Image (cartoon, helix red, strand yellow):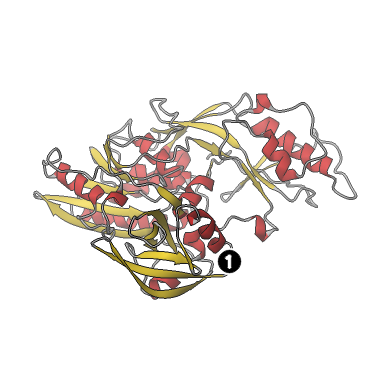
Amino acid sequence: MITASLLVISCSKDDADKPAVPTGVVTRHEVNTWILDSMRYFYLWNHTLPARADSQPSAIDFFSMLKDKADRFSTIYRPDNPSSNTRYMLHTFGLTFNIISHTSAPGGAIGVVQLTVPGSGPANLGIKRGDYFIAINGTILTPDNAASLSRSMLNSNDAVLTMATADNNVITKRADITLNARTIREQPIYKQDIRKVNGKNVAYLFYNAFNDSYNANVIHAFTQFKSVGATELILDLRYNPGGSVAGAALLNALVAPDIDENSTFAKYAGNNNMGHRTVSFKSALSVPENNAPIQFSSLTDARLSLQRIFILTGPQTASAAELTINTLKPYMQVIQIGQSTLGKDKAAVIITDMRAPQRIPYTLLPVTYNLFNARDAGGYVDGITPDYQVDEMGKLPLAEIGEESDPLIAKAIAIISGGGREHILPEKSVKRYFDAQGDIADKNILKIPTVLR
């Protein structure tokens, strides 16, 4: 029996089918048997699982042993153990950055700030997008230590960044700035505006996470776009690691033409137990991860119903952000600019022990479905390739969010204005030694509600 809430999907066996709840000390065999039984039912690759549980490994090790070689995303954790909860740079220190090669930097590598969360410590200390740093906690960045220093920073309660300027390839050291770890809540709409391009009203939205807590903000933004007659949209998802399925369906419903609540949003293909499911916009909007269900009819005043959309992407674009791109393609022209996305074409359900008292303290998120659009197109395991390849790191310093000097935005504007072919894109693709936002994109798995209204 599957017990569902709007927040998570938690799974347990029907009382008539399961043995009496064990008593006494919880053994590794009991834990691992519960994990294996859960995986047998939900796991996309359940045909690869062993016949019985191994009592020797720890739960985390056993779960790892069960994962198929093609599985990059299934995970297990203990909600009651803070150390098992992954920390992310953006939500811990309030900024995200890349560390890239720079021949003039003291150690041959330099940190480039991509975002700071408004109101966070870094923002209040004056750190902004496009700033540089050359050291973490007093150690000069090199290609070899960039990742280890960054992860050490992420696991600490404070960190010192040595800021720098880069002028004509001359690196000048600036002040040391101390950052304190906090739990930071991100408002994912960083910028929205309207600009005139050849007489057209072009809307721009930088959206950094599909978070149902901010669905009303998304609807409000599109209501404003519609009120001024926007006929083009540049949707900036370059750092968006995904999030809610309902959030993706909402965004698509606000832009796709000629759809109604019964139109197909997406298709899910699971194992022999989970089967294949076609999900309408009505169904997807009915089960947000939090907040109230969304009525398709309530979106009328915000729907742009465009014929095409420009979507800006990067290697951190993942999960629900990729689902948005793929599921829009049957309904409109999607012009993708930037770099290939991460390649997360799968989704999971959340599994916990629902017995009282609870015996198993772990939460499982096993990959459960392959994701497809209304035309049965999916399989983007290597990412979704853009129509126009451009690496923003190939043109430094980084422009402010939404500025037309940004090479991705400039390309979209050039196409809208009719000069797309003449616009020259940066040819350079820059190697990242550490990508702070990439951690979120890699570990954030799309969660599919098992029960849809």
Looking at the picture, how far across and down is residue 338, in whole percent? Answer: 30, 43
Which residue: 34% across, 67% down? Answer: 128
On screen, residue 55 versus residue 68, left or right, reads right
- Estimate how packed mark 1 is, as few (under 14), some (14 to 19) or many (20 or more) residues with alpha carbons within 10 Å: few
Using the rendered image of the protein, determine whether residue 120 is visible from the camera's viewpoint.
Answer: no
Choose between 258 and 358: the one closer to the eye.
Answer: 358
| Residue bearing mark 1 | 156
Can the viewer see residue 345 in this picture? Answer: yes
What x and y, as percent, mark residue 33? 79, 37
Q: So how many labels did they put on this image?
A: 1
Q: Is 392 situated left or right of 360 in this image?
A: left
Left or right of residue 350: residue 267: left
Residue type indicated by callout 1: Ser
Give the residue displayed 62% in from the left and 28% down from the top. Answer: 45
Q: Nearer the viewer, residue 147 or 308?
A: 147
Q: Does dot 1 land on a helix, a strand or a loop?
A: loop
| Residue at (27, 59) in percent of width and height | 397
For the N terminus, the image quarter is top right
Instruction: Classify residue 79 by image quadrant.
Output: bottom right
Looking at the picture, how far across and down is residue 107, in whole percent?
42, 59
